[in-house]
Amino acid sequence: MESTLKKAIVVKLGGSVYSSRDSVITDIIRLQSEGHPVAIIHGGASLITKWLEKQNCTTSFYEGERITDSASLDVVTAVLAGLANKEIVSTITDADGKAIGISGADGGLIQGKIKDRAKGYIGSVVKIDTSPLEAILAGGFIPVIAPVSRHSFEREPGERALLNINGDTAAGAIAAKLYARRLVFLTDVSGIKDENGAILGRISASRAKELIESGVAYGGMIPKIRACLDAASNRITACSIINGSTLHSLYKEITEGDTGTSIYPD
């Protein structure tokens, strides 16, 4: 199983590309049929915001991560681990694929701690237990993972047992632990831009880090790049940030490359 996992492709499906997910799902099922174990980690930021508004809850972000108080955590959990997760699983099933939807809390897959109590239940990853994924992949299923995770470390009395961990962060940690061959972020942009606004092609992990430190990369791109740096730290996983709205861009990226920005270990 270990050698099979090293062929794995971890896909981060952003909420912004939900409208084109049928094409993405077709690509994922095709890649799996060609011998690539595929794991999906999904977001759902716009859907969460919609449901927070229905509950008259305000929402704000810091460096691409949603500030999450206890009331917001209820909505995040219900939307990510419930509605968004099961819609993706059902889409895969409708396309004759096989999928199992789980959250980071299931089986202790993603275990974390609060990053900053002033920002609520935003979590950071402390431990990844890949055994639930290994069991799902061994059964021929595609795991679909919601990044609602277990509050396992430094938990104080009265604090919630769940954490809202950024989906990009979770994807990077899972890819690193699996020693996956590829980590692909499907977004609504064509890649990382340089100082002049041009899309970068192939760059090193150290160059990606410089883009954050210089302020060239900002907002929602920051957790994506940091996740790529996390994954690339295993010296195995190559990462890509591509436009998932383009028809069959995922399959093209895996088989041909050069569809967005690729980040490789130094």
Image (spheres, rainbow, N blue to C red):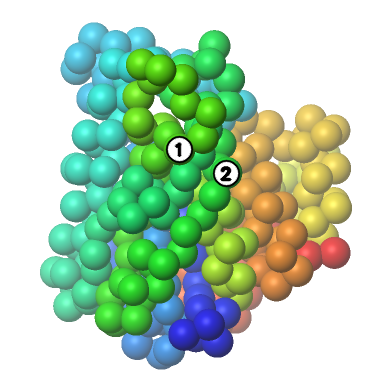
Q: Nearer the viewer, residue 149 or 246?
A: 149
Q: Are marks 2 and 1 in contact (CB under 8 Å)?
A: yes
Q: Residue 126 — which label?
A: 2
Residue at 36% x, 64% y: name it. 132
Q: CA distance from mark 2 to mark 1?
A: 9 Å
Left or right of 59? Residue 240 is right
Q: Which of pointers 2 and 1 lies earlier in the amino acid sequence? A: 2
Q: Secondary structure at mark 1?
A: loop
Based on the displayed image, in which of its 4 quarters is residue 210 positioned?
top right
Left or right of 144? Residue 41 is right
Q: Nearer the viewer, residue 214 or 35?
A: 35
| Circle 1: residue type | Ser
Q: Nearer the viewer, residue 28 or 70?
A: 70
| Circle 2: residue type | Val
Note whether 70 is above or below 259 in the view shown: above
Residue annotated with mark 1: 152
Please provide percent x and percent y for residue 191. 63, 52
Please provide percent x and percent y for residue 224. 60, 46
Residue at 58% x, 20% y: name it. 116
Note whether 256 is above or below 93 in the view shown: below
